[in-house]
Amino acid sequence: MAGTLVETVGLKKYFRTGKTGVLETLLRQFPPLVKAVDDVNIRIQEGEVLALVGESGCGKTTLGRMIATLETPTEGSILYSGEDVSKRNLGRIRREIQMVFQNPFESLDPRATVRAIVREPLQKLGYGKAAKDAAVDKALDSVGLEHNFAERRPRDLSGGQRQRVAVARAIISTPKLVILDEPTSALDASVQSQVLNLLLDLRNEFKLTYLFITHNIAVARFISDRTMTMYAGEIIEAGPTKSVIGSPKHPYTQALLKSVPSLDTKEVAPPTGEVPSMVNLPPGCRYNPRCPHAMDICRTDDPKPIKVEDEDVSCWLYK
Amino acid sequence: MARRPIRSSGQVALKTGSAAAETKDVKKGASFYLEYIRKDKPAFVGLLIIAAFMLFAIFEAIMQELANVIGQPDLGWMLLPTNPLALTFDLKLEPPSLADFPANILGTNFQGQSILSRVLYATPHDAAASVIVVGSAIVVGMFLGTAAGYYGGWVDEIMMRLTDAFLALPALVLAIAVAILIGGGFTALLYALMIIWWPTYARFFRAQALTLRNKAYVEASKLSGSNSFAILVKHIIPNSVDPIIAYATLDMGTVILTYAALAFLGIGVSSDYPEWGAESAAGLQFFPLQWWYSIMPGVVIAIVVVAFTLVGDRLQDLIGGRTTY
Amino acid sequence: MDVENLAITYRTVYGTLKALNGVNLTVGEGESVALVGESGCGKSTLGLAIVRLLPLNASYSAGRLMLDGKDVATMSNREVVRMRGSTAFMIFQDPLNTLNPVKRVDVQMLEAIHSRARHTNAPFSEGEARKEAVKKLEDVRMPDPESIITRYPHQLSGGQIQRVVIAMGLVMRPKLMIADEPTSALDVTVQAQVLKLMRELQREYRMSIIFITHDINVAYSICDRMVVMYAGEVVEMGEAGHITRNALHPYSQALIASVPRTTKDQGRLTSISGSAANMLSPPSGCRFHPRCPYAMEICSSKSPPETEKDGALVRCFLHGGNTS
């Protein structure tokens, strides 16, 4: 039984939508609060691919960035193999985490060579120059790029090639956890399939753990073992992918699935209404204004996760 | 609100290029800039003028230094048509003519000296001023601005208030005051200009750092174990410099203009050095009858400044960045 | 709309680029057609060509583009202005860049109504126009139109802006709506809402739609007929369900097989080997042949003609045109 790699406890990230300067503090008039991530408790098991699915503004990117230690939580803690993050162990923990970003045009330094980009994670690990070059070549092999790509610069590469370089950079130091934030959203369909296949192969070969953030449920279904759906800052459903996507329990997950155009259904059936404004959340369950099954309790109390079969669902329907 | 990146193919006019960029090695760097400037005739002419100006200034400076060191003053005007410092009153105030080419094409001044020779004699100061002032401004601005933009907090506040202070004071007045306080003369004027020239660059580098520190590749660098200093040196500064090249080129022209203006007022002028601005000022009393004495140095200043402007503008087109900060 | 053998060429710093090459396409009244393909295939170019919005370095180098009986390529400027909005209108991908950010929604909608009144020489009254604007917003299923109409674009979400843009287009009662990736920048649920809306509007207004997208799933949900494009050519065209169930061209097949599905387990996704065609010097013969698993000798030397097979139009030697 694989161990728990990452565990978040009561994780919260609140933002103010404006400046909090001297004036604001004196007058006690603060700009509105955005509860981007609100009390999230998740576990990432070693070796699994965990998909975090949601639409824009739901907090999935913020959650991913906090786990990547790029943002500090407002409240709550993140445990890495049982250890809490502090100034002392930040460097050590960061070495075990890597990230692949969404925009292939922004995630590589436009002035650096591919070699410089890919070998950057190897710094301060005691590698000599020759060892670093060998590692770069091996990483490029793993992602299917020829060695002569090492001397080129990002501007000469296509979107798919850049993402491969980003993936090479992410795996070169064999991290324990790779966080991927919409890695294929900006790519064409044929390139997307290549990159997704590649990610799966790499995971199997190097025994990696992925946190795969995406808005695309079909991609989540393809690549992940477990899936979590997120809505307005909360995890509303979590469980094995086959369950969550195959037979979704939460009305939002169900609506999400019915909204995805697919070659199997001619018409889409979207939910009504819009994602709530994060500065003005509805009371009770955040989905209640749009939910076809909304009950009285939904409008007053925010549901906590309940065990339903092999999933955790935050919905009063399952009390 | 959804904010997915728009695929590069969404922009039609650019799309046709991106398909080619996949396979073509688009060269950047010095050769590319050169090629680009060459395509625009005015800019190319400007580049030639700048090159001639700088090269001549270097040689003339060497000769003048040699003249000082060895003690042979006429080395200083070996490259010039005539002796710019000799008093030959019988040739005084001759209008521009083709006689004695090329000594007389700008005419002569009150002391019979060829204005052309005097102007050429003074080029090292202007060339040095433009390079040194802009160069130092870039260096100082880079350090202060990048640090302020990247670290934020009180470092940023202090630097911003500092630049505000400098920008609030009228630059020329400040330069004059500093030059007089330090003691007058060419080096004093240089220091004065250096002191007032950096704030714009600091703001520029700060703006760049603010944008770049949020870039994904900076975050990737953090995850790779780079500390702030490494990130600044490896990622932020190299990517800040590109847009500044165009502005700096334009700015060198501005330095020459400012320098000439101060020399016109008599700041930083020593009696035996024919600064362009000073020459123009000296010629004022003979205006408009002997108009060439005052106008011709001005024409030379204009030509050089316009040359810088043409090249700078052309580079600006290429980079497409903002021109004022 | 009737496109005959259309070719569009771009002059670029790298050379001439034939973005469209011999495209034939007919769109009937009230019909919904999807142009599907990846970046560089020419689908956006075709959309822009219909409303004469191509950039300055593009030219209609061959063929005809007949819109409502007139050739768009040879129209005078005045005819083009009249055509845009009343015969055909276009919506684009980025909602924020389509509306004027410094004008309120009602001002912009009134502009559209005023423009229509001028073209049709009809009387214009602001009160009537306002009522019509609100009515149009209701038509696009906008909740609370009275309040939306007083807002600025930056106060609206992407989905709302797209609805406003569609409403503005509908003001002119166009015969053809061209949508270039209108939902790619939107969330999944919002995209579904906009797609459903467009389907309903198509039926209510008897409007033809040309929907440009790279996503074959989206194309399938919105269109009656599907047109698959690759490297500036139409490689397959036919009824939507027919193509998705039984694609004939290897590229269409690969496109369908490479997309992950929500409803079934896939061990690996099919990917298309090679990379997109270089439009500056496209491959000889059939443009897809370097990437085609079924390429034959003739494919590299001759370009396959359009042949009809099983009710679909295919450009592939596997299915005809190979007279050797």
Image (cartoon, coloured by chain):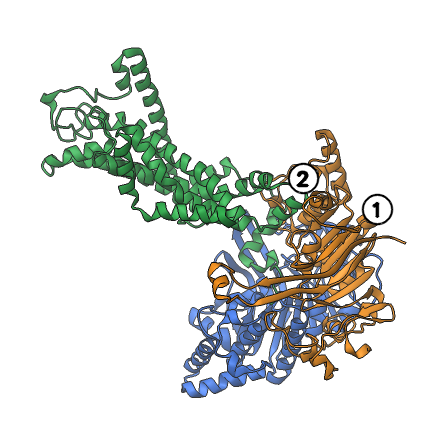
Dot 2 falls on a residue whose secondary structure is helix
**Residue at numbered disc 2:** A120
Percent across and percent down for residue A202 are 80, 48
Q: Which of C322 and B116 lies nearest the eye of the viewer?
A: B116
Name the side, left or right, on which C299 lies relative to C197: right
Number of residues whose C-alpha sits closer than 10 Å to that of mark 2, classed few (under 14), some (14–19) or many (20 or more): many
> What's the mark number on residue A205?
1
Q: Colour of chain A?
A: orange
- Would residue B175 be found to the left or right of residue B148 on screen? left
Whether residue C260 is visible, yes or no, is no
The chain containing the residue under callout 1 comes to A
- Residue C37 image point, x, y percent: 67, 62
Q: Which residue is drawn at 41% across and 40% down?
A: B248
Q: Mark 2 lies on which chain?
A: A
Q: Compared to A169, does C117 lie above or below?
A: below
In front of the other: C143 or A2? A2
Is the residue A203 above or below the residue A41 in the image?
above
Residue at x 49%, y 86% (from the top left corner) = C132
- Mark 1: few, some, or many residues within 10 Å (few <14, many ≥20)? few
Image location of residue C65, percent across then percent down = 56, 68
Quadrant where the image shows the C terminus of chain C: bottom right
